[in-house]
Amino acid sequence: MIKIMHRLIRMTGKYKKSIRASYITSFFKGCLMKMPLMLSFLMIKYFMEGTMDKKTCLIFGIILAASVLLQAGFEHLTNILQSSAGYKVFANMRIRLGDHLRKLPMGYFTEGNIGKISSILSTDMVFIEENCMGVLSELVSFIISQALMILMMFYMDIRLGLLSLFVVLVFFVVGNLMLRHTMEHSRKKQEYSESLTNEVLDFAEGMGIIKAYNLLGENSKKLTDEFEKNCQESIAFEVDYTPWSRALHLTYGIGTSLVLIACAYLFHNGMISNVYMVGMAQFLFDLFSAVKSYYSQMARLTVTSASLDRIEALFAEKEMPDTGKEKLPDSASENGKVAAIEYDDVTFGYTEKDVLKHVSFKVKNGEMCALVGPSGGGKSTIASLLARFWDIGEGKILVNGKDIRNVPMGDLMDHISMVFQRVYLFQDTIYNNIAMARPHASKEEVYEAARKARCYDFIMALPDGFDTVIGEGGASLSGGEKQRISIARCILKDAPIVILDEATASVDADNERAIQEAISELCRNKTLLVIAHRLKTIKDADQILVVSDGNIIERGSHDELLSENGMYARMVTLQSGT
């Protein structure tokens, strides 16, 4: 229990002082919680001994009222110091997590971890934030209250004090055994929650395919099975926890009975006075309530421990190194001695198997380099490595003569724009989706970028124009419209290097012309690395690289490659239908 509390405190960072300060207020709150009981015992003692008078009664009343008011005051301070700090802690933690995720290699997001991230954000963090940060002060109050009750028992009679202390020790033994047994179920419970989140996301994202192929029943069954597993694990958790909860209640009942029997025995034999017997009757049912309440938080804290394990594991994922200090020049040298882009003997694999093998090529400033070849050959990998979505295994990638690993990530990304086939737009206004490329751009600059991207007219035709809020992922727009907005974003960014996954490959003919015009605006005076699907669009490329099985097997201009009569020539023949 103390270990879990320590882990919670450790993660509070700069709010640690507030949390620790709340222990002081919790200490006083714990003392004051038992003040009415102790005062009432003293009042009964004075009455039974015949020493109570008006003045003493008034003093007791003032002390009692003051203790109640002070308890409320200390509780309020505790909430300010701790509970509010808990929300701030997790607000900052979510921001830290976003920054951490931004620095992870893209491979992490393609290995089925989206459900884990969603589960941690929506389940683990929320659970701790809402259920456990405020519990810390309560636990301190419970410990102080229980200690005061035991001391009161020693004050009444040392034998009753020892018996009460023994019962509390039994509570600790039973409680710690319960902690061990429920911890494993807590971990499984959170793992099943993650699995369920994964399945829900898959089901929602694949709804179009599910309906198109009439797979609703089959996929619904998979989702239902996940709900059933989650339900069964939750029930198993409760089944495992309930006997221990009963054991705690039995310990409470038996311990209370033992103290009552011992007290009656001592009173019967004249070992304690009638005053202490009445006082004992008054304290009895509150004697072990604090330690009972302490362990009633056990289920929440075991789930908290499992949630902390998952949160810490996510933060422990290795980030891409971003320790570069070199300044990236704005452009390559004009004399051509330094290329805008250079791959020098690059080898890379997502796992132990190499996907690219000793790839080398140069792209001069202002040139267009096209990557073509069969699917899975490595074209997209080459482009992704330029943006440092992953780090290479061997060799070097240079931009304007600088190894990209020696350049700060932010500086590198300021020099690169990317347009991919699969466009993602955020659930925000169209204006903000474009302006995110350069947040300090003026409104006229954003509008001008939209005009160049051939999307200004259709945006203005929408009910709220640029203030129209689009659905998550751009769901409320057509594919061509989303593509043009993404190009407007890149035009506004005005980066000297453009990575282009041919944007017209999956759009209709009506949109193709507008997108081609938008791309022409984007690519003017830029260095281009193009992943080409329609070969007719790259006839004028300065160089074409044919990539197959992780190797560059052909390179040259369109005419040079046709004359070689190799893979490129066969691809052109197949696409032209001749």
Image: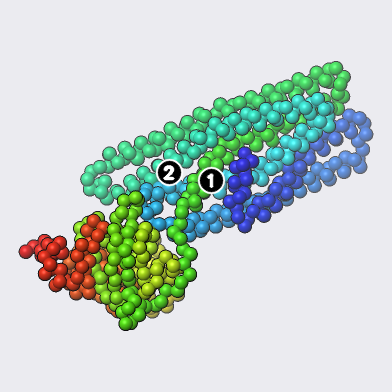
x, y percentage for residue 101? 45, 56
7 over 333 or under it: above or below: above
Q: Secondary structure at mark 1?
A: helix
Choose top left, top right, bottom left or bottom right for residue 373.
bottom left
Label number found at residue 194: 2
**Label 1 sits on what residue type?**
Leu
In this view, the residue farthest toward the left is 578
x, y percentage for residue 136? 64, 45
Between 95 and 108, which is closer to the camera in this rendering? 108
Quarter of the image that includes the C terminus: bottom left
Q: Which residue is mark 1?
A: 308
265 over 9 or under it: above or below: above
Picture residue at 37% right of the left edge, 74% below the top? 400
Picture residue at 20% right of the left edge, 62% below the top? 553
- Give the CA distance from mark 1 to mark 2: 14 Å
* Circle 2 Cα neighbour tier, 10 Å, few/some/many (<14 / 14–19 / ≥20): many
Choose top left, top right, bottom left or bottom right for residue 169.
top right
Between 466 and 89, which is closer to the camera in this rendering? 89
Between 388 and 22, which is closer to the camera in this rendering? 388
Q: Is residue 568 left or right of residue 456?
A: left
* Circle 1 Cα neighbour tier, 10 Å, few/some/many (<14 / 14–19 / ≥20): many
Choose top left, top right, bottom left or bottom right for residue 244.
top right
**Label 2 sits on what residue type?**
Glu
Quarter of the image that includes the N terminus: top right
Q: Is residue 120 left or right of residue 488?
A: right
